[in-house]
Image (tube, rainbow, N blue to C red):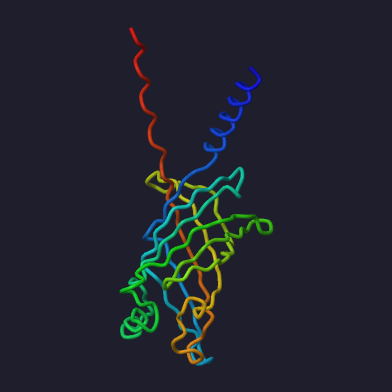
Amino acid sequence: MKSTLSSATFFVLGLAATASASTWTFDPMHTRAEFTVRHMGLSNVRGDFAKLTGTITIDDKDISQSTVEATIDVASIDTRVAYRDDDLKGEDYFDVAKFPAITFKSKKVEKSGEAGLKVTGDLTMHGVTKEVVLDVDELTAEMTDKRGTAKRGVTATTKLLRSDYGMKSGIPMIGDEIKISLDMELVKKEAPAAAPAAAPAK
């Protein structure tokens, strides 16, 4: 009996943990991945990736159980200068033909200060995977838009060296350090409806 009760208890606790988590996807119209790099030590060049998709599972009761997965379409790069964008897509930099996506998959989520978070995960870019830490400035509370859609917002920043990912072209005229800023509006993914109960056997 003791063994049966213990199994039942763990099962109920597992259901409770699952129920406290919610799944969110990126709203493409209100999500951007922006970057900044120094040019000749004189100015900052900024650009962004227009296509960023992903899923975040948020557990508000235990934030450490939350997860993040994201994918950037490298071909969507936009620095407001067409020939520069073409150059960045080429073999000297991102080499989009071989490496069309940048991906991030979290390994750890932890609180940082009163409202912030640190999300540690693997960033894969240009065929190289390195661990990075995203500093989350804000994860907003859930709200509902005029269409009745549940939404949240999250902003995060990080820094990396592009040379760590095999992109050394242009250094030092073009900076090695890249500053990244992420602004994501999240849309709640509704849980699937429960299956109807089976009719009792006659």
Place of residue 127 in the rendered image (x, y in percent of width and height, measured from the top left): 42, 71
- Residue sitting at x 69%, y 59%: 113
Q: Nearer the viewer, residue 31 or 135?
A: 135
Q: How many labels does the image show?
A: 0
Measured along the vertical axis of the image, is residue 177 above or below residue 185? below
- Residue sitting at x 46%, y 60%: 184
Measured along the vertical axis of the image, is residue 182 above or below residue 22? below
Q: In which quadrant of the rendered view does residue 52 lie?
A: bottom left
* Residue at the right extreme, as displayed: 113
- Residue sitting at x 44%, y 59%: 70
Quadrant of the image containing the C terminus: top left
Measured along the vertical axis of the image, is residue 71 above or below residue 195? below
- Judged left or right of residue 154, residue 10 is right
Quadrant of the image containing the N terminus: top right
Place of residue 167 in the rendered image (x, y in percent of width and height, measured from the top left): 45, 81
* Residue at the top extreme, as displayed: 202
Q: Which of 140 and 57 is in front in this view?
A: 57
Place of residue 58 in the rendered image (x, y in percent of width and height, measured from the top left): 53, 48
Q: Which of 30 and 38 is in front in this view?
A: 38
- Residue sitting at x 40%, y 81%: 93
Place of residue 98 in the rendered image (x, y in percent of width and height, measured from the top left): 33, 73
